[in-house]
Amino acid sequence: MNDSVLATPTAVLDARASLGECPVWSRDEQVLYWIDINAPALHRFDPRSGENATMPLSESIGCFALRARGGFVLALRSGIWLADAHGHPTRKVADAPYDPHHHRFNDGRCDPRGRLIVGTMNENRDRGSAALYRVDTDCSVRELFSGMTILPAPVACFDQTRKMPRTERAGHF
């Protein structure tokens, strides 16, 4: 066995995130976007420079997707928002389909057709009231199924063909 293959990993970013999730690699920019759910922010990490830019948000974020024309779609506690390239929410396109006092968006990804597949979670974890939704490119929202407490990341990434898209190959919103 080649010892160089088993090299010791090196941390490239000491983020000290409260709850860092949803890494998305931008092939165009060659940067990694990620979120901190509990300290609501969208982050942009540039591995070439080592710089991590923080784009603070005013409410919890469950996930996001890159938009084909630039900017982001954000799944915030209050609903689905479009954001500019600096992460500033500019337009709410759908209200949250749940009671935001005890539910929030959890995880999600764009499917190969460019639709955001996003799950919710019941933060009280006292009943199966979370659901999986699809946000189409026209910003309409459709419930796919419900009755769970928390939708884990792999479930939130499925598409209607029942195939699991690779994250770095998923479409843009």
Image (tube, rainbow, N blue to C red):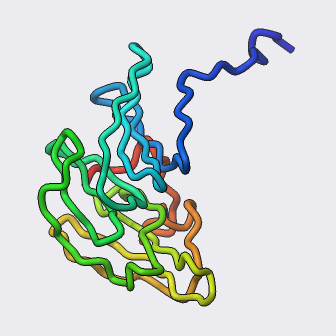
Q: How far across and how far down the image is residue 164, in percent? A: 52, 58
Residue found at x 33% / y 83%:
97
- Rendered-image quadrant of the C terminus: bottom left
Q: Is residue 92 left or right of residue 25?
A: left
Query: How many numbered marks appear?
Result: 0
Left or right of 134 in this view: 162: right
Extreme residue in the right direction: 1
> Residue 54 in the image: x percent, y percent?
35, 36
> Which residue is located at x 42 percent, y 69 percent?
105
**Eyeballing the image, is 64 above or below 77?**
above
The residue sitting at 39% across, 61% down in the picture is: 60
Front-lying residue, 89 or 149: 89
Quadrant of residue 89 within the rendered picture: bottom left
The residue under the point 49% across, 86% down is 146
Please identify the quadrant where the N terminus is shown. Answer: top right
Going by the image, does 4 lie left or right of 170? right
- As drawn, 4 above or below 25: above
Residue 40: percent from the left, percent from the top?
39, 52
Q: Nearer the viewer, residue 129 or 77?
A: 77
Left or right, residue 29 beside residue 15: left
* Front-most of residues 6 and 49: 49
Residue 84 position within the rendered picture, expressed as x and y whole percent measured from the top left? 16, 46
Q: Quadrant of residue 96?
A: bottom left
